[in-house]
Structure formats: structure tokens, C-alpha cells
């Protein structure tokens, strides 16, 4: 199944050509600041599985971090990010997808800085910081990650 997405103005359009390996709800302070919300939803997918249909995102690197965000230069919508530890993957903003409800979070991360009023549903794994990929990811997704390297 492919997932199509776009920025708010439609200048940047893209398609995911595989299912994401993982969907994070990230509650870190940086994601809260960048989104102006309580958390961000990121679908982790290999870079070669994201097909850019139109546009060329601009980027901005957050000094002192391994985070580079990509956004539409016209409307400012953040479409995906790259993090140093998983440099062969894009972290696609689930809210930019045509059907964001099709990708609920597999995990909540950096909950040590989660907003205290937010309740995480039972049954979804929760980590105060990040997690150990080989311990948490399936063998299939670890193989995909290795192949993307």
C-alpha cells in the first residue's frame, strides 16, 4: 500500500512506496517546539522508498543536534526529517499524508518530557527516551534498515 502526502500548499508532493518500518509519537522538547504541539508523529521509512513527485524541500539543521528538517519553501510545512542515527531513513510527518489516520503510533518516545495532561493509550509501548532498535524492531524491519545502509 502506498501513502501519498503533500505540504499545505501542494508545492511538495510525495509518495511512500513501502509501509513504514515504525511510526513514532515523539514527545521530546524539540519536537514540541518545532510543531507547536504536544508531540510529532513520524513514519520511519528508507530514503529510497520515498518518491518525490513535485517540488524540492528546503532544509534546516538544528545546531547541536543530528536533526535536519525538510520543509516546503513556499508554505513552511515540515514534510520529513533526518536524524544522524538513522541517516538512511526519512522520518515522514504523518500529518502530511492524505490519510494520516492510517498510521497510528507503534511507540511513544521521549516521554520523559511529555506534557503531563496527555494520556497515552494502554497497549502502546512507551519509552522515557529512545529505545534499542534491535530489541524493539522486528527482524524484517532490521533487515530493511541494514539493506538501506
Image (cartoon, grey):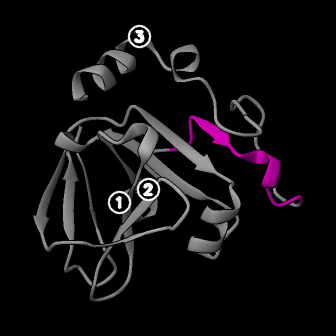
Residue at the right extreme of this rendering: 116
User: Mark 2, mark 3: which one is toward the viewer?
Assistant: 3
Residue at the front extreme of this rendering: 64
Q: Is residue 92 left or right of residue 65?
A: left
Residue at the top extreme of this rendering: 139
Q: List x then y, in percent, for residue 142.
A: 38, 18
Earlier residue among tags 2 and 3: 2
Q: Residue at x 55, y 43 (%)?
A: 24
Q: Which of 32 and 149 is in front in this view?
A: 149
Asked whether disc 3 touches disc 1, contact meaning CB atoms under 8 Å apart, the reply is no
Residue located beneath label 1 in the image: 97
State the separation of the CA atoms marked 2 and 3.
24 Å
Find residue 2 and report its image quarter.
top left
Find residue 77 and report its image quarter.
bottom left
* Mark 1 nearby-residue class (10 Å; few <14, some 14–19, many ≥20): many
Q: List x then y, in percent, for residue 30.
A: 63, 64
State the separation of the CA atoms marked 1 and 2.
6 Å
State the separation of the CA atoms marked 3 and 1.
27 Å
Q: List x then y, in percent, for residue 75.
A: 33, 87
Q: Residue at x 40, y 61 (%)?
A: 68
Q: Which residue is drawn at 10% across and 63% down?
A: 53
What is the magenta range?
104-116
Q: Which of 42 and 33 is in front in this view?
A: 33
* Mark 2 nearby-residue class (10 Å; few <14, some 14–19, many ≥20): many
Q: Which residue is drawn at 24% across and 72% down?
A: 57
Residue located beneath label 3 in the image: 139
Residue located beneath label 2 in the image: 94
Q: List x then y, in percent, for residue 124.
A: 69, 32
Asked whether disc 2 touches disc 3, contact meaning CB atoms under 8 Å apart, the reply is no
Asked whether disc 1 touches disc 2, contact meaning CB atoms under 8 Å apart, the reply is yes
Amino acid at each position: 500500500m502506498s501513502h501519498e502526502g503533500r505540504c499545505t500548499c501542494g508545492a511538495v508532493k510525495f509518495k511512500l512506496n513501502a509501509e513504514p518500518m515504525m511510526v513514532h509519537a515523539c514527545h521530546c522538547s524539540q519536537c514540541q517546539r518545532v510543531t507547536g504541539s504536544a508531540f510529532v508523529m513520524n513514519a520511519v521509512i528508507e530514503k529510497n522508498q520515498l518518491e518525490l513527485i513535485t517540488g524540492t524541500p528546503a532544509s534546516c539543521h538544528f545546531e547541536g543536534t543530528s536533526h535536519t528538517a525538510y520543509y516546503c519553501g513556499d508554505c513552511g510545512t515540515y514534510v520529513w526529517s533526518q536524524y544522524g542515527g538513522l541517516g538512511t531513513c526519512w522520518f515522514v510527518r504523518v500529518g502530511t499524508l492524505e490519510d494520516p489516520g492510517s498510521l497510528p503510533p507503534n511507540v511513544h518516545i521521549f516521554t520523559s518530557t511529555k506534557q503531563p495532561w496527555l494520556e497515552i493509550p494502554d497497549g502502546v509501548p512507551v519509552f522515557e527516551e529512545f529505545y534499542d532498535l534491535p530489541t524493539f524492531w522486528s527482524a524484517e524491519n532490521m533487515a530493511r534498515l541494514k539493506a538501506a545502509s
